[in-house]
Amino acid sequence: MQPGLTSIGETGRHTFLFQINVTRRCDMRCSHCYILSDKKDKSPDMSEAEFLHVVQGIVEHMQADHNFAQRYNHVDIHVIGGEPSMLGVPFFESVLPKAKVLLAMIPQAVSFSIVTNLLQKEALDVARLFDKVSTSYERSTRFKKRRHEEMWRSNVATLMEESRHPELYGPKDFAVTTALVKPVVEAGAAAMMEELYELGFTKVHFGFFIPSGDGDLNSKLIQPKHAATSQFYIELMDWYLANRDHIDDLWINPCESWLDAVYRNAPSDDVVCPIVAGALDIDSDGRTISCIEKGGTNDYVSHGNVFETREVAGEGGVTEVQFTTTIHEVLTSASYLREVVKARRLPEICRSCDERTLCQANCGVLHEQWNQKDECPGFKTFIKYVRHLVEDKGVLPKSVLERERSMGNHLIAVG
């Protein structure tokens, strides 16, 4: 999926994903983008008060909903857009320390990251304020001008070097997401990974293309066939397994997540629809939606606007403005819960599929356009290949290998 950065580097987690779209404005117009250009042109920016209201709402929901807090042991928060760095360094210098204080109040592990195109120097400066950073790269569909790609590569090189020196710059978890548009698929998995590895990336997410926003308008030119996407993933898995043991910190999704899912015979948060696993997209105008991709359009049905306010009389008769809608109210609303139930209801054609438990029908947007004849939107050919690797070839997910290695080291130490 195009927003991409989910649980790279960890498996077996129960994650709820919050996407805070601080703005939909962007200094790029990628032809595959899931956000409409018209929406980018008209987007408001979040104020500091609005941003902190969202974060406070996440914390309060965790504290108020015991069942929710028990169900999820991890909270993944993406600060995203548009291009979030367009709000400027002072905005983030002000809100991030306050947000981190709030998030420290919940017992769940929290990943707090920025998703940035890393094009301008301002984007680089803002990225430096985060411990986790994700950028994106695609061939042909991302950069309209050669100098833009050169600017991006320069900023990547700078941040990559800084991430290797946490004692000087603070810890950095730096990853890249690539949407599987036609030019990427046609380049081939090995060529794409070699290119990204040469840039320094060892944490990579290849998200399948979803036709939404500008990507929907350009889908005839840039959307690959599902069969081609499956074949790309198979070749990607081969490259990953050939290199996993001798490249430090190498973690490629969805390869690692699918190995883990098949091995445990349990669906992974990384490979099912985010609505099924748990997700909420907060738009820059306060509207909310469960489908992250559909949030890039203008005409979706919101589950509630968290930026609605009212005036109340405060002390001494001074009028105060208060937010009237909370994250908790949205996530417990009938509208949101109906959307989750709908996403979890398998399409009829999927109900007899032997991989339905792990795949859970994958993406509803893709199902809406599938002809139900060719390769399915769950990329079943790839799933079957992973099952062959795990069950017939004995390939283990990294989490199991690391656990076995740790146990072996413990026995040696005891011996």
Image (cartoon, rainbow, N blue to C red):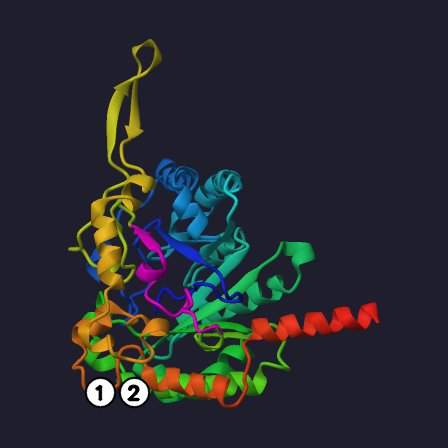
Label 2 to label 1, Cα distance in Å? Answer: 8 Å
Residue at horizontal 30 percent and vertical 54 percent from the top: 25
Q: Residue furthest top?
A: 316
Q: Is residue 82 visible?
A: yes
33 above or below 302?
below
In the rendered structure, which amino acid carries the disc numbered 1?
Asp
Whole-percent x, y for residue 71 in the image: 42, 52
Q: Nearer the viewer, residue 256 or 308?
A: 256
> Secondary structure beneath disc 2?
helix
For the N terminus, the image quarter is bottom left
Q: Let me know if residue 199 is in the magenta part.
A: no
143 above or below 63?
below
Whole-percent x, y for residue 272 in the image: 35, 68
225 above or below 45?
below
> Secondary structure beneath disc 1?
loop
Q: Residues within 10 Å of mark 1 (few under 14, many from 20)?
A: few
Whole-percent x, y for residue 407 in the image: 70, 70
Disc ID at residue 374: 1
Q: Are marks 2 and 1 in contact (CB under 8 Å)?
A: yes
Q: Let me know if residue 280 is in the magenta part.
A: yes
Q: Residues within 10 Å of mark 2 (few under 14, many from 20)?
A: some
User: What residue did someone put label 2 on?
Assistant: 227
Q: Residue furthest right?
A: 415
In the rendered structure, which amino acid carries the disc numbered 2?
Ala
To which quarter of the image does residue 379 belong? bottom left
Q: Is residue 303 left or right of residue 207?
A: left
To which quarter of the image does residue 385 belong? bottom left
Residue at horizontal 76 percent and vertical 68 percent from the top: 410
Whole-percent x, y for residue 173 in the image: 55, 62
Q: Which residues are magenta?
A: 264-282
